[in-house]
Image (tube, rainbow, N blue to C red):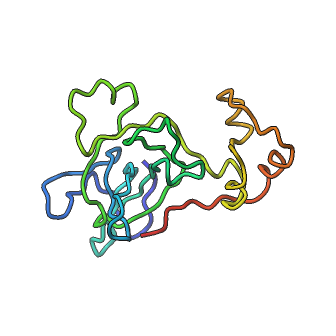
Amino acid sequence: MAKTRPGKRDLDSYTIRGTNKVVKAGDCVLMRPPESGTASYVARVEKIEADNRNNVKVRVRWYYRPEESMGGRRQFHGAKELFLSDHYDVQSADTIEGKCSVHTFRAYVKLQNVGTEDYYCRFEYHPVCVGMSVEQTKQLDQFVCSDCASDQNVKKPQNSDDASRITSGKVEPKRQKR
């Protein structure tokens, strides 16, 4: 486990406010979005810590829905599909609404009863390795960095202008600090 900063202490668990549900590192949770009427965000808890005033914070790794990714939702994406991102963040534990389960695709299709808190993940989402601004990626038909494309035998952009733009700029994640 990572070192805790001065004035902070690691916690083994956190009980979600108003419930008897206990969250531990490694659990997936639903996080309250800042905008009302928006679907809850989904994250995996990496670490739980409290400061000297007992304010509990969680370090999370975000999952994105396909429509939140730069490529957008495609026809083959399932309604309960998520992408595990490389975006980490620290949030107040008070924003945790509940627990959920993120299954592998293989385990998800074997579920007898899919609940409202059941999701699946079959892809990881790494916008930073594209190395482009959001505006630049919206102009491409597809975008995959050359490292990821060679790993997954994905077709690389044919347009040399598109390929050259992949190496410049920086992608900022869509998630906002809450």
User: Toward the viewer: 99 or 57?
Assistant: 99
In the image, what residue occupies the spot 75% across and 35% down? 156
| Quarter of the rendering occupied by the C terminus | bottom left
Q: Position of residue 164 (x, y in %)?
A: 84, 48
In the image, what residue occupies the spot 42% across and 59% down? 4
Q: Position of residue 138 (x, y in %)?
A: 67, 55
- Give the residue furthest to the bottom: 53
User: Which image quarter: residue 158?
Assistant: top right
In the image, what residue occupies the spot 70% across and 45% down? 141
Q: Position of residue 161 (x, y in %)?
A: 85, 49
43 left or right of 171? left
In the image, what residue occupies the spot 39% across and 51% down? 43
Q: Position of residue 11 (x, y in %)?
A: 29, 56
99 left or right of 6? left
146 left or right of 60? right
- Give the residue furthest to the right: 160
